[in-house]
Image (cartoon, rainbow, N blue to C red):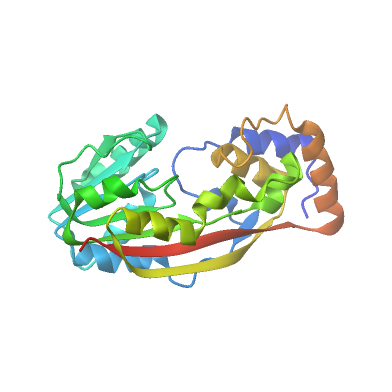
Amino acid sequence: MTDRTFEDLLAEGAAVPTEGWDFSWFEGRATEARPSWRYAESLAGRLAGATAALDIQTGGGEVLDFALGRAAAAPVLTVATEGWPANVAKATALLRPRGIAVVASAEDSPLPFADATFDLVVSRHPVRPLWGEIARVLRPGGTYFAQHVGPRSVFELVEYFLGPQPQEVSSGRHPDHERAEAEAAGLEIVDLRAERLRIEFCDIAAVVHFLRKVVWMVPGFTVAAYERELRALHERMRAEGPFVAHSTRHLFEARRP
């Protein structure tokens, strides 16, 4: 465990930029087990077989860029959407050299594309899938291939700061609920797998940066508002070792008939 002071670690965690979905800063300070299906690598194979692909809520474009870099071939048309302005700029800078347009589109808005435009729609960790829109923009026979965040993901950390949370707080993310919603939109479920994965936070800077980056975990989180809880957690981690939590993920594959 680091001997750096609480104040130094707090300042570092508060200063790290939060744009995009590059988590490389956490190396050596936090770990997360990865799902067995290796989404980004699997996505590369799906992209190689597609002619027109859409990546919903691309973040900073990192996952799409990684997958395209490993795909044997690229779709003739690939488009991405993103709702957070800072991420739109980052994704555009990363994906433009690949000829990919990034369209600014709020996560809860209809997709700005014509019906039956894409034979592949993908997403990694969408906030909330708009199943009717996904079905609408897919061509008949087209596929939705995504990795979703499951229910009560990293809730050990959430409940440390907010206290016990009602079961229904994240029930909408349950794979059974999402299956029902996808089927109601006219999609056929091809594959649905879920895993619970261990996370370790090794210092308080990692906790601060994580909560600043994944803003829906502890809504309204700031260092000033939670300094007392952060200090207590810092002392606990120094005495007992890393703070352990668990993420939940599910692989979702659905097809438009």
Against 181, is 232 above or below? above
Location of residue 31 by image quarter: bottom right
In this image, 5 relative to 152: left or right? right
Q: Give the x, y percent position of residue 225.
A: 73, 27
Closest to the observer: 1 or 216? 216
Identify which residue is drawn at 59% across, 37% down. Answer: 212
Location of residue 151 by image quarter: bottom right
Q: Give the x, y percent position of residue 211.
A: 62, 41
Against 44, is 172 above or below? above
Q: Give the x, y percent position of residue 244.
A: 71, 59
Q: Residue furthest top?
A: 224
For the C terminus, the image quarter is bottom left
For the N terminus, the image quarter is bottom right
Identify which residue is drawn at 60% across, 42% down. Answer: 217
Q: Is residue 66 visible?
A: no
Q: Give the x, y percent position of residue 176.
A: 48, 62
Q: Is residue 206 visible?
A: yes
Against 247, is 133 above or below? above
Identify which residue is drawn at 40% across, 43% down. Answer: 59
